[in-house]
Amino acid sequence: MLILITSQAAIHHNGHLNTNVIQALIGEQQRGNYVFVVSNHNKPDWFDECFRGTGVGYVQNEGRQNGNIVREIAGALKKPTYDVLVLAAKAEDIQMAKNGEAVLIAAGWSNDNQVRALGVRIDTPQEVRNVIDLTEGWDGHWWFEGQGQKYSVKALTDLSGYGRDDAQVVFSQKLTNTVKNGGHRLTALLIVCARSLLIDGVGGTGALFWAVYPSSKSRNDDTEVLSSFTHRLRTIVSRVQFARLSTPLFIRHTPSDKRSAGRGGNRCDPTGQITTMHLNPAYAKSIRGRNVIVVDDCTTYGLSFGVASALLRRAGANTVTGVALGKFGNTIQHFDIEILANPFQPLGPDDFRLINTSAMVGKTDSSAQAALRQLIR
């Protein structure tokens, strides 16, 4: 069961009640979820007329923007805050959700500019049911979590069922389709990623910096499928602005061999990655002390995260976390790489040292894979 919180603004606008929203909220309460309307103001006369006897609750809480009311409601119901979905229709709703470390969803019928800029939205009240249906099957566990000496890795999906030869190609195409097609599947995928990150405490982590590992032929203009996905994810689980839109953290100055193309060679040799990319000089003074989250579509050996970590640690990053939407097999490695030159400029084969590689120790959890496969297809 989930907790759904919204505000008067999602229901009542310019003197008119949105009966579709009212019915959607009542429907979720009847299905066993908890539904609340939270406001700084006293309960309006229309509330009882619309919700009397339905179980939908009204909570008046001055200063709700600080997020404490989210924690209070969740605590009273013995639920974690990452099981709270906030349907936002105004700026105060956004603040309440982020400060309360809840999952934030924009009401697509809102005219508020801040709400319309959010990365996760439902366009009609009827989509509330679709999104909750797809989200409820996710218990918030990563398929894989590994902690290395230099960085950590988390992966959402087990790719083993796709077949070794084309697992990454097939998954990447499925992910591309999900992101480009949008709709409730993309919304639900973003929500399960957000919930997993919120479980890990990302909402309360300071000095965050979000980045996308560049594709083999990246145009460096922040138009990759994962760029859109990551910016959307960033807006619903954190208050940070980095990396900025249209200004990616990683620059692919020379096309690299596509890691999933099955061309053979040593998949654990970082040379081809390090010598074809560097950090964006626009962030030369922005990385030190940051906790960086690097998103990649899928991983087998984990080389992308080892390379990203090496560049970022050279630039002064505090921590590096690699998040892969998919992981194949049990071959992921931890790469201890030392960058010997300026990470904000192109590097040569003599500008780094591979100290060692070792198996990335971690744990797996398959409990929610069936639900996740419904989102990426």
Image (cartoon, rainbow, N blue to C red):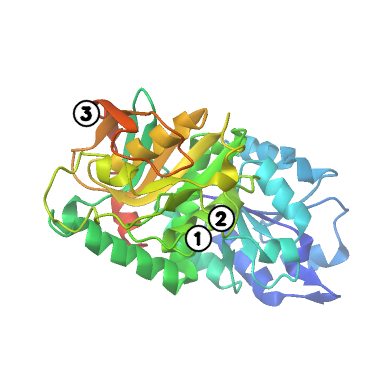
The answer to whether 289 appears left or right of 301 in the picture is right
Quadrant, the C terminus: bottom left
Question: Is disc 3 placed on a helix, strand or loop?
Answer: strand
The answer to whether 219 appears left or right of 62 in the picture is left
According to the picture, the residue beneath numbered tag 3 turns out to be 359
Name the amino acid type tagged 3. Ala
Label 2, residues with CA under 10 Å away: few <14, some 14-19, many ≥20: some
Q: Is residue 41 above or below residue 345?
A: below
Question: Is disc 1 placed on a helix, strand or loop?
Answer: loop
Let me know if residue 52 appears in the view. Answer: no
Contact, CB < 8 Å: mark 1 with mark 2?
Answer: yes
Q: Is residue 211 above or below residue 9?
A: above
User: Which of the two discs, 3 and 1, sits closer to the camera?
Assistant: 1
Q: Position of residue 121 (x, y in %)?
A: 59, 65
First in residue order: circle 3 vs circle 1:
1
Name the amino acid type tagged 1. Asp
The answer to whether 202 appears left or right of 150 in the picture is right
Q: Quadrant of residue 189?
A: bottom left
According to the picture, the residue beneath numbered tag 1 turns out to be 222
Q: Position of residue 145 (x, y in %)?
A: 34, 35
Q: Quadrant of residue 297?
A: bottom left
- Identify which residue, 7 or 376, lies in the foreground: 376
- Identify which residue, 156 or 353, lies in the foreground: 353
Question: Disc 1 versus disc 2: distance between alpha carbons?
Answer: 6 Å
According to the picture, the residue beneath numbered tag 2 turns out to be 247
Q: Position of residue 97 (x, y in %)?
A: 67, 48
